[in-house]
Amino acid sequence: MNQPQASPAPIRAIDVIRKKRDGQELSHAEIEYFIRAYTSGEIPDYQVSAWLMAVILRGLTRAETSVLTDAMLRSGEVLDLSEFPVKKVDKHSTGGVGDKTSLVLAPLAAAGGLIVPMISGRGLGHTGGTLDKLESIPGFNVNLSVLEFRKVLKACGCAMIGQTSKIAPADRQLYALRDVTGTVESPHLICASIMSKKLAEGIDALVLDVKTGSGAFMKKEEDAVFLAELMVETGVRMGKSVVALITNMDQPLGMHVGNSLEVVEVLEVLRGHGPDDLRELCLELAGWMFHLGGAADTVAQGKLEAERLITSGKALEKLREMVALQGGDARALDDPSRLPRAKHIRDVSSPKDGYITAIDCEAVGTACVVLGGGREKKEDAVDPAVGMVLHRKVGDQVTVGQPLCTVHFNSETRAASATKLLLESYQITDVPVAVAKPLVHRVILGSNRK
């Protein structure tokens, strides 16, 4: 008589945690179970936190990263945007300080005829979040249903929302947990987080802005390149056109750091002004979006089209349309006094004469968090009004007493702590910096061009 075959042992969360802690490769079934069980509430935050830390310390193989991305993608709905006849293109940044390019690029690309279905995130660690910036516009609703998301896309060509309960819910939960458990920096977790969200959007092409430097999660350029290659490879495998730009984050992008302050700077760029570095990067990324989206034969042509759309005012008008459609007060785009404002401002002055040779960009981002402009705990509310406006950056000459930046604050205690961080972040020497680092270090282009 044949003996009945034993049923496979059930997968347990503790076994998955131990296996990764010991540096072993997880199976397809173990990863799928872990993500499914966490999303459904079977596994508590504290066990997932332990697993995330094991991943930080032990890493994931490319095969594990692929399975994790797919499991997170399949945890919710994958949008079908085939009703739109033009290319669907998105852009994503891995996170930096003062990085507000998404608020420029979504309306800019839509004004050029592309569809931009942008699903974004909250502030993570010392970096600002696109959703927090958008919500500093009074009334702006980032929590649209999938149906409402489609309606806004149909009406104006771009929409910017957070992960809904239906789109990549696993990422939404993991994203918030990573922020408060010291598990942000893993390239494998960053890849799975970004690509699961982006591939759920139903896009044809994706432009990735992978930051490197003191204000980035990837401090070393080789780590940024590894992450970029991982994401490009994942996107190409899923049939998408993908490019990654490795860009400099050794100092804040632009001059404004903090949610409503960054919206003000976005408006400056869309009016044809704004800081050179922010404007240059926006045009470069827009050029790639138009090129991959088939609206320009070359990146150079795409950049010229982006400049034309800004000069004509069409990009700013598109932002007005999107803000109004998502419940925001579009009047704030023409009258920034309607945006949240801090009760107090105070200059942080240079302690000596010399040249600014470096800025600890992460410290600047942390100072913004300390002011209340980011989250120290998962449940923290964000103060949209606080932040800082920089007056001097790397390469600039300063004299003692000259303002380095102006802090916008609502709490004296928080301002004192932030001011200390900001003073420590500036490196001032007698000799000027020899050669400025380029804004774009290199470009990694996927082979799946359509």
Image (cartoon, helix red, strand yellow):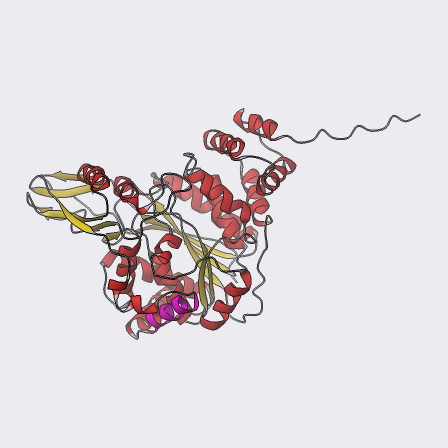
User: Which range is magenta?
Assistant: 316-326
x%, y% of residue 328? Answer: 38, 65
Can residue 296 be seen from the camera position used here? no
Magenta stretch encompasses residue 149: no
x%, y% of residue 447? Answer: 50, 55
Q: Is residue 358 left or right of residue 292?
A: left
Please state the total of marks drawn on the protein image.
0
Q: Residue furthest bottom?
A: 312
Q: Is residue 262 left or right of residue 203?
A: left
Can residue 369 be seen from the camera position used here? yes
Q: Main secondary structure of the magenta part?
A: helix
Magenta stretch encompasses residue 320: yes
x%, y% of residue 292? Answer: 45, 63
Can you say whether 170 is above or below 304 in the image? Answer: above
> Dividing the picture into quarters, in which one does residue 82 lie?
bottom right
* Quadrant for the N terminus in the image: top right
Looking at the image, which is closer to me, 203 or 291? 203
Q: Is residue 187 left or right of residue 440?
A: right
Can you say whether 144 is above or below 170 in the image? Answer: below
Looking at the image, which is closer to me, 65 or 376? 376
x%, y% of residue 178? Answer: 45, 38
